[in-house]
Image (spheres, grey):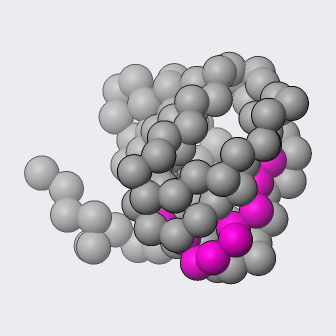
C-alpha cells in the first residue's frame, strides 16, 4: 500500500511539481500544476492518459486542442506530439506505459 501524501514532491519544470509511483509496467505521476505553466511540445514512446482531478488544462494532442476539466481523461498514443497550458491551478494524474525510466531519477 502506498500513501500518496508521504511521497516526496519534486519540481520537474517551472510550475510542475510531481509525485511518482513506478510499477513493473507503468508509471503514475500525480501533478500539482500552477496556473499559466506551459508544457512544451514533445513526444515519447509511452502511451499516456491524463486525468484532470481539479482545474482546467488546455491540451493539444496531435492537431486537436481541447480544454480538460475534472472528470475528463485525455488519451495520448505513443510518439504523438502534445503540449499544454494550465488555465487554472490544476491537479492531474498521468499514467504512462511502459514505465518512464527517466522519471525514476525523481524518486
86 is within the stretch colored magenta:
yes
Residue 15, quarter of picture: bottom right
**The residue stretch that appears in magenta:** 83-91
Q: Main secondary structure of the magenta part?
A: strand
Vertical placement of residue 98 versus 102, above or below: above
Q: Residue furthest left?
A: 1
Residue 27 placed where, x, y %?
45, 39
Q: Residue at x 64, y 29 (%)?
A: 76
Q: Residue at x 41, y 73 (%)?
A: 8
Counting labels gives 0
Residue 61 placed where, x, y %?
76, 35
Residue 90, quarter of picture: bottom right
Vertical placement of residue 96 versus 102, above or below: above
91 sits to left or right of 17? left
Residue 3 visible from this viewpoint: yes
Residue 30 visible from this viewpoint: no
Residue 6 placed where, x, y %?
27, 73
Q: Residue at x 48, y 41 (%)?
A: 73
Residue 2 placed where, x, y %?
19, 56
Question: 33 and 57: which one is in front?
Answer: 57
Vertical placement of residue 104 versus 55, above or below: above
75 sits to left or right of 59? left
Amino acid at each position: 500500500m502506498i500513501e500518496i501524501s508521504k511521497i516526496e514532491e519534486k519540481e520537474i519544470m517551472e510550475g510542475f511539481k510531481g509525485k511518482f509511483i513506478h510499477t513493473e509496467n507503468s508509471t503514475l505521476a500525480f501533478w500539482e500544476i500552477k496556473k499559466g505553466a506551459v508544457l512544451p511540445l514533445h513526444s515519447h514512446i509511452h502511451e499516456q492518459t491524463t486525468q484532470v482531478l481539479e482545474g482546467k488544462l488546455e491540451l493539444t494532442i496531435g492537431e486537436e486542442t481541447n480544454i480538460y476539466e475534472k472528470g475528463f481523461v485525455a488519451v495520448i498514443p505513443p510518439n504523438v506530439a502534445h503540449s499544454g497550458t494550465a488555465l487554472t491551478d490544476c491537479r492531474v494524474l498521468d499514467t504512462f506505459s511502459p514505465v518512464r525510466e527517466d522519471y525514476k531519477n525523481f524518486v
